[in-house]
Image (cartoon, helix red, strand yellow):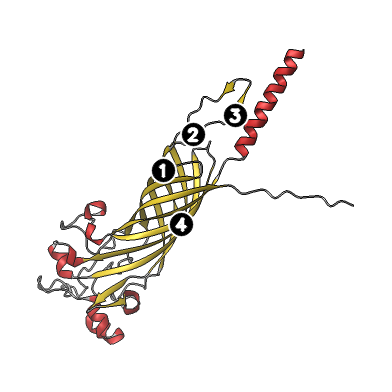
Amino acid sequence: MKKGTHIFIYLMLLSVLVFSQSKNKYKYELIGGIGPTGFLGDLGGSSQSGTHFLKDYNFNSTRFNINGGLRYKKVTSAFGFKGMLTYAMVSGDDALTQDKIRHNRNLNFRSSIIELSVQAEYYFIGEKTKNLYSIGGLHSKKKARKFTAYLFSGIGVFYYNPKEQLNGTWYSVRKYHTEGQGLPGGPKQFSNFSVCIPVGLGVRYAINKRFSIGAELSVRKTFTDYIDGVSGRYYDKAKLQQAYGATAVALADPSLGTIPGATSPNGDGTGAQRGNPKYKDSYILFTVNVIYKFKFKKQHRTRAKF
């Protein structure tokens, strides 16, 4: 009976110690990062015609991004969640491609992107830490794992505002309705806000108990084709000038003229192709992150003495 009592007390002490340690794990993390940004859309691209997605990426249009956020993750869990705020700059320029049709089109753009997203993470190489207890000669056999890797996806909303450079000055594409948005026979005006789906891969390495460094590569699939301000067809230049002036016409068609008739109306009177609305725009983020673990301290209530 005495031996059984000792074993019971031993197990109770062990369980209390383990539970108290699990409660004190650092479940929250601050994240901050910076890195390059790429754009995949109608403007610029590779020197091959008819390519799409990563095959159409032009490294000369690479810009930058910076982000910050908060992650919640239990050490013993394979899943984590984070909220992120990201600022990114994207751009594209037909002058950078040797594709004859796009080079002749001669359009360009740049746009700031401000994105707010929530993401779920799955750690296929999870985190492990050493247990810090030793009772009655019993020691933990777990080894700390400093390297972890994960997949992530989620949903976000973002603001964008494409601008085109003409004679050294940047103009808002939306303001000048360059494809006849809102005019008779033209498409409806596009919004400055859209939704994106982040999908990516991340890795991290623990420097110590609090700090880690990491890297993420992700693609933002969006639901708009107007991040670069280009999507459909050329609009009637006379009507565009009447509505928004000569600057709108110059922004709509700054073509080089190396392909005669490329921007002229088709035989049936419809505008010539300016972009391809079949494929929505995407942007790529690569970030190097610094992660800081912390925990919230519980406030203990004290009873008033009477």
Q: Distance between the residues labelled 2 and 4?
A: 25 Å
For marks 1 and 4, the one nearer the N-term is: 4
Q: Residue at x 71, y 20 (%)?
A: 8
Q: Is mark 1 on a helix, strand or loop?
A: strand
Looking at the rendered structure, which numbered label has been put on residue 128? 2
On the image, the x and y values in percent for residue 228 come to: 30, 67
C-alpha distance separating marks 3 and 1: 26 Å
- The residue at which mark 1 appears reads as 204
Which amino acid does the dot numbered 4 rest on?
Answer: Gly
C-alpha gap between disc 1 and disc 2: 13 Å
Q: Which SS class for mark 2?
A: loop
Q: What element carries label 4?
A: strand
Question: Is residue 263 found left or right of 79 in the rendered image?
Answer: left
Mark 3, residues whose alpha carbon is within 10 Å: few (<14), some, or many (≥20)?
few
Eye-nearest disc, 2 or 3? 3
Location of residue 110 with respect to 75 vertically, above or below: below
- Percent across and percent down for residue 96 are 18, 64
Foreground of the two, 39 or 233: 39
Answer with left or right where residue 262 lies relative to residue 284.
Answer: left
Give percent across and percent down for residue 21: 61, 35
Q: Looking at the rendered structure, which numbered label has been put on residue 68? A: 4
Sequence-first disc among 4 and 3 = 4
Q: Are marks 4 and 3 in contact (CB under 8 Å)?
A: no
Crowd band around label 1 with a 10 angstrom C-alpha radius: few (<14), some (14–19), many (20+): many
| Residue labelled with disc 3 | 133
Please identify the residue farthest to the right as the structure is shown.
306
Q: Which of marks 3 and 1 is in front?
A: 3
Amino acid type, callout 1: Arg
Amino acid marked by disc 2: Lys
